[in-house]
Image (spheres, rainbow, N blue to C red):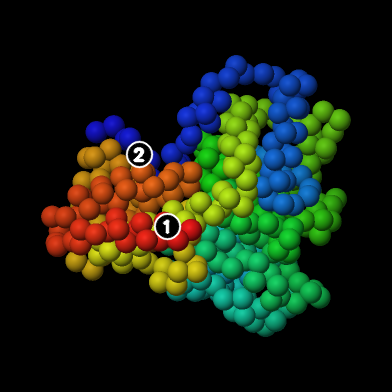
Amino acid sequence: MKTKYLLTPGPVELPAEVLRATAQPLIGHRCPAFSELFSRIEKNLSSLLRSEGPVIILPSSGTGALECMAVNFLGRGDKFISVSCGVFGDRFREIAERTGAVGINVDVEYGRAVKPDTVAKAVNENPGCKAILITHNETSTGVVNPIKEIAAALPNEARPLILVDGVSSVGAMECFPEEWGIDALGTASQKGLLTPPGLGLVWLSPKAWSSIEGRLCPSYSYDLNLHRKELEAKSPANPFTPPISLYYALDEALREILEVGVDDWFKSHKRYARAFAAGLNSLGFKLLVEEEGFRSPGVTAFGSPDKDTEAIRKKLRAMGIETAGGQGKFKGKLIRVAHYNNWGWPELCLILGALYGASKAAGSLKADFLADAWKIWEEE
């Protein structure tokens, strides 16, 4: 059956207006109309992030944004601290290692959040590290790391640059790099920013910009200084041809988010995620992230001790609902469902009802799962 509901954590289900925006006629990327479009996107990204300074937009995936940070800040012989609690934390580590830099690894159990004192201890025990690499929202497990608290726990003197993977957090939850003391943030278009895949975005603090001033980046396409020079010119532009249709889509997605209001947008995602979790618990599923305060507003990972998750996913696909499976050591053991868009109670009922139908044959299920979900929904 053709997919009717895309519940993977990237790409995600997109608003109709965003999809229509991609159909606008193309314009030249050196013309005034594009500069106006680019400037508006920059202004709205600043509002979303509550941070000053340019946001570099790259023709890439989220992985490209992470590689961009790695090649600009790290090189052969440098040391970095890599904090990982999942598959994408491991990926960020591997990207950094390919620059020739040497990693000091801090690993946290999958499904658990990183504790601020764990990172502070690693920094104090390993002086001379150039950067800390950490993931804000770990897509493989659905856990959110307390980045604000982690940054606050670090020493002010000789503090490494804090490089954050915000690929699956920006747009779905609070992520305010300037307020939190982050030095570099990498994200992408295809998750919380509700845009088709193809754009990587990087924000830097003044400290981070100063650290690469005059440095020759080994990558031309990921050279942040080159991108900044073109962006801050009289007529803002890219160093090379950008995917213009995706800029149209991002412009519309940001307009919709800001129209709702950043705070209300994030609250609606938390509400949906909490109600969804209540329904899953009632259905007999086990959420991977046990501590509610660290569960992602954007993606929920869950399994079952007595149900075949891959069989359930197959039945959901037959209904036209596409989900994601587990990754790494959880491959074949988890279902991951994304909730990045601005869906409400009707869509939540549909998804929980589909899970009920897909898993009913696997064992007895409570029939009051919607009532349990509604209790949480009504609280907000």
Residue 316 is situated, as x and y percent measured from the top left of the image, at 25, 45
Amino acid on which disc 1 is placed? Glu
The spot of residue 329 in percent (x, y) is: 35, 65
Viewer can see residue 97: no
Bin the neighbour count of mark 2 within 10 Å (Cα to Cα): few under 14, some 14-19, many 20 and up: some
Q: Is residue 1 above or below residue 95?
A: above
Q: Residue at x 65, y 67 (%)?
A: 148
Q: Residue at x 81, y 59 (%)?
A: 207
Q: Judge by depth and name the residue closer to the eye, 182 or 379.
A: 379
Residue 84 picture location, percent across and down: 53, 67
Q: Is residue 335 above or below residue 59?
A: below
Q: Residue lying at the far top in this picture: please name it.
A: 25
Identify the mark at residue 378; answer none if there is no mark.
1
- Residue 6 sits in quarter: top left
Which residue position is annotated with label 2?
5
Q: Is residue 274 above or below residue 251?
A: below
Q: Earlier in the sequence, mark 2 or mark 1?
A: 2
Asked if residue 294 lies left or right of residue 358, the reply is: right
Q: What residue sits 84% from the left and 52% below the top?
A: 213
Nearer to the camera, 91 or 194: 194
Q: Secondary structure at mark 2?
A: strand
Q: Amino acid at mark 2?
A: Tyr
The circle drawn on residue 16 is none
Q: Secondary structure at mark 1?
A: helix
